[in-house]
Structures are given as C-alpha cells and as structure tokens.
C-alpha cells in the first residue's frame, strides 16, 4: 500500500493506511503498546492492541526501540485525547532497522552533548518545529520580495574586500591572492539596482565574531533588499511591511509548530505597520532615564537594545546613528553631518537587532573620503566608486538576519537552534 504522510491522516478516517517513519517514544501498558511515530511531516500515536493483531506483529511492537525505522499499517481513528486528534489502530508493523542505544534519550541532556549530536537532535520535536518555522519564514521573505517588484540577484561568496568592517573577516586564498568570505552582498547589489531597480540577495554571510553570545552565529543567512531612488523613509516602509508579512504568514502556516514551542502568539499578532521610530539621540536620552547611560557616539550593546525595545510591543526603528558607529557606505544626514541616514530594527521582548540598513552615500567625494579614513583598500573598491561616477542616485537597502528573526518568532533563548548545523565560536562539528 502507498505511504500516507501523517500531516494528511485527517483524509483517511476509518481507512487502512501505511505510514513509514521512526519510533519517537513508546509507552508500555502490557497488552496495549502506545507507539509515538514520526515521519517528518508530523507525529501520530499508534496503538498496538494484542488482541487485534498477529502474535508476530505484537512481538515486533514490544521489541521496537527509540528511533528504530519502521513501517506501520492500521486504521485511522479520530480521537480527541490523542495529540493531533488522530490515532492509528495498528494491524501490522515492519521494523526496517532495530536501533540500539540511541544517544538522545527522553532525559535531560546538556547543550554540548546535544550540539555534538546535532545530526540526531534535529529529530526532536522542538527542533523539528523551529526548523519548520525557519522554512516558512524564508518562504514568506521570498514571496514578499518576488511579489513586490524585487529581482533576485545572487552575489558572490568569495570577495576581494570587506563590507562590514575588517575585524570579522574570514580570510582565504584565491590563486595566490587574498580573498574573504562574504560578510554581506550589499555592495554588489548597489551595482545590480542600477541595472534592475530593485533587487535582493539571499544567502549565507560569514563573520568571525569573537565573542560568544546567544545572538551571534559565525555563518548566518541574510536577505538583503536594495532599492534605487529610495530614501531612508521608503526603506523603513519596506522593512515594516516585510517584517509584518513574515510574522503574519508564519502565524498562519505554523500554528502547530508555535504551539509545540509554547510561543505566546498574542505577542506576535499585533505586529502590523506602522512600527514605532526613535532617533539614536532620543534613545540615548531615554537610556539615561532608564539607568542604562551611554555616551553619545557609542554604538548600542545588547543591554541598550533590550532596554529601548522593552518600551514597545512592536519592533522599533532606531534611526540616525552617529556616522562614526556605522559602516563607511552610510549616507550623511543633510540636517546634521554628524549623523548617518541609518536605521536598525530592534525586536520586542529582548530579541535585539533583526535588521540593519539605511540610505547609501550617493556622493563620490564623500565615499572616497570614508574609504581613506577607514583605511580600506581603495583598489578593491574602484568598481564600487564607478557606481557614483556613472549615474549615481539616492538609494537604500537593508539586511534582515534569518536566524535572529526565527529566534524571535519562535520565542527561544538561543540562536543556535534556528539553523540545521550551526557554526558558533569554536564549533564546526558536525
Ligand atoms: O547590521 P548588519 O551587519 O548589516 C549589514 O550587513 C548590511 N550590509 C545589510 C544591508 O544593509 N544590506 O547585519 C544585518 C543583520 C543584523 O541585523 C542581524 O539580523 C544579522 O544580519 N546578523 C547576524 N545574525 C547572526 N549572527 C551574526 N553574527 C550576525 N551579524 C549580523
Ligand atoms: Mg547591525
């Protein structure tokens, strides 16, 4: 008989079906064995009742161990008490492989052990839920951009120069020359927008972050939309529309996953445009009142982001940071040359920055000066300077971190669970 996926069992009430999967766990009640079976699409309780099956099949149900692979057949029954509302009355069971001593048992394990066994940990219910949310978030991002006039432009992974400062660069070798793993595709998409208007890249970014935090990965995924003839204001509008679209789509598509994660979804439902905005300078004053004083001109650390965001139920834009705390490409605020036309989006509930972006310098002279001031290798940026020589226009863009966004939507503590195989400080296995 053809395989039925657990997510589709509602269509088969009262019918005999076959499910192919693995044993998640088992409860032994003597003549009744309750097998929790997962198949990748979901979980279902399978009830083995000694009276209703051959002695051989019941023996197999007794013998089967955690994470054994198996094929079961039985009749689908609606049952309010069962997780998911359905169960399968087992008639036959075939063990594909009888697993011995699966390392991750239902008892508590330490995080290092779980990370060493990440290739197996992925099978656990919460990890399953988180990574399905990740997939839904990525789908929502792509749908939003593809349907709103953005063209996908894949930018290179191997690059000759830094985009986001030299301290986190991963150096490698390129036929005898120095090269770096990309920190961001932004600079390249400042070129593609002059050909296509609105573009985005969506790929991995690499940063040798030297501090261990629950918000940083060494390899993470970022979507970076870029727009010609868009100012900071327009950029923030696109950001709030995109973020609320991602959240509302995920709420629709991942209700079951968010329930598994015990996420308080009422905190996500109200996240619709417009998002609140506060200037960096006002934020500094507010921080002082809150007892998180910071000298004007310094970049926010995690405690400052958390304090500012705690004042709002929605994500909040902090805009116009001092030019000195932002990257070389930021446009200067015409009203105050000390400020940049930049903005970060801080998630509520202490999840920190999920977007960084702003308006880019349109002026050749200013850009040349910044490159010199920051000691960046001018030769590597000649092509980038060309964009200001030949038809420069006001333009803006931003980068949204997928894993930060998923951490926030799932309401989980640490970013490492939001990517199948996390790269963190000092860990590259498995
Ligand atoms: O603020 P960042 O560094 O901005 C840029 O890279 C710009 N070039 C983006 C652009 O304008 N096109 O990074 C953008 C976002 C952050 O807000 C955060 O969500 C995520 O990328 N991010 C990280 N996520 C996980 N681990 C890290 N080490 C991250 N660094 C940045
Ligand atoms: Mg940033």
Image (tube, rainbow, N blue to C red):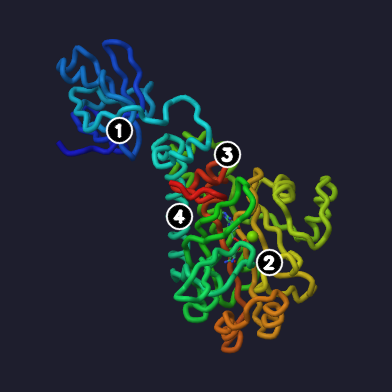
Q: Is mark 2 within 8 Å of ligand 1?
A: no
Which residue is denoted by mark 4 in the rendering? 138
Q: CA distance from mark 1 to mark 4?
A: 27 Å
Side of 321 where 64 appears, left or right: left
How many marks are shown on the rendered structure? Answer: 4
Which residue is denoted by mark 1 in the rendering? 22
Q: CA distance from mark 3 to mark 2?
A: 30 Å
Which residue is denoted by mark 2 in the rendering? 342
Asked if 278 appears above or below 158 in the picture, the reply is above
Q: Is residue 10 visible?
A: no
Asked if 24 appears above or below 298 in the picture, the reply is above
Q: Dot 2: within a 10 Å radius of its alpha carbon, few (fewer than 14), some, or many (20 or more) residues?
A: many
How far across and down, in percent of the image, does residue 202 sit?
Answer: 47, 63
Image region (quadrant) for ligand 2: bottom right
Asked if 257 appears above or below 170 in the picture, the reply is above
Q: Which mark is residue 266?
A: 3
Q: CA distance from mark 3 to mark 4?
A: 22 Å
Q: CA distance from mark 1 to mark 3?
A: 34 Å
Q: Is residue 312 visible?
A: yes
**Mark 1 vs 3, N-terminal side:** 1
Residue at 43% in and 65% down: 146
Q: Dot 1: within a 10 Å radius of its alpha carbon, few (fewer than 14), some, or many (20 or more) residues?
A: many
Residue at 42% in and 27% down: 105
**Mark 2 vs 1, N-terminal side:** 1
């Amino acid at each position: 008989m053809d395989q039925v996926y657990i997510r589709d069992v509602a269509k088969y009430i009262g019918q005999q079906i076959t499910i192919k999967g693995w044993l998640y766990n088992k409860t032994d009640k003597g003549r009744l064995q309750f097998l929790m079976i997962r198949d990748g699409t979901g979980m279902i309780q399978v009830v083995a009742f000694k009276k209703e099956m051959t002695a051989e099949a019941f023996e197999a149900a007794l013998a089967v161990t955690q994470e054994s692979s198996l094929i079961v057949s039985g009749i689908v029954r609606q049952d309010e008490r069962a997780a998911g509302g359905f169960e399968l009355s087992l008639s036959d069971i075939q063990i594909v492989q009888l697993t011995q001593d699966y390392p991750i048992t239902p008892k508590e394990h330490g995080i290092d052990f779980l990370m060493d066994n990440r290739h197996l940990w992925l099978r656990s219910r919460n990890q399953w839920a988180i990574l399905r949310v990740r997939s839904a978030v990525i789908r929502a991002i792509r749908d939003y951009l593809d349907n709103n006039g953005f063209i996908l432009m894949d930018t290179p992974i191997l690059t000759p120069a830094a985009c986001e400062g030299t301290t986190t660069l991963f150096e490698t070798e390129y036929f005898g020359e120095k090269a770096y793993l990309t920190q961001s595709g932004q600079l390249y998409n400042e070129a593609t927008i002059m050909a296509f208007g609105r573009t985005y890249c969506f790929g991995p970014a690499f940063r040798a972050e030297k501090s261990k935090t629950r918000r940083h990965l060494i390899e993470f995924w970022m979507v970076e939309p870029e727009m010609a003839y868009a100012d900071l204001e327009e950029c923030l509008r696109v950001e709030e529309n995109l973020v609320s679209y991602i959240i509302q789509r995920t709420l629709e598509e991942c209700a079951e996953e968010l329930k598994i994660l015990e996420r308080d979804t009422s905190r996500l439902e109200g996240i619709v445009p417009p998002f609140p905005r506060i200037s960096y300078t006002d934020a500094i004053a507010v921080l002082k009142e809150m007892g998180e004083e910071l000298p004007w001109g310094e970049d926010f650390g995690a405690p400052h982001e958390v304090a500012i965001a705690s004042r709002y139920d929605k994500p909040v834009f902090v805009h116009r940071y001092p030019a000195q705390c932002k990257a070389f490409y930021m446009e200067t605020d015409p009203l105050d040359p000390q400020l940049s036309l930049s903005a970060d989006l801080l998630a509520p509930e202490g999840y920190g920055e999920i977007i960084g972006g702003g308006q880019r310098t349109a002026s050749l002279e200013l850009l040349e000066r910044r490159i010199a001031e920051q000691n960046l290798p001018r030769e590597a940026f000649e092509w980038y300077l060309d964009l200001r020589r030949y038809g420069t226009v006001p333009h803006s863009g931003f980068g949204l971190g997928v894993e930060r966004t998923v951490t926030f939507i799932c309401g989980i503590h640490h970013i490492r669970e939001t990517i199948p195989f996390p790269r963190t400080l000092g860990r590259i296995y498995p």
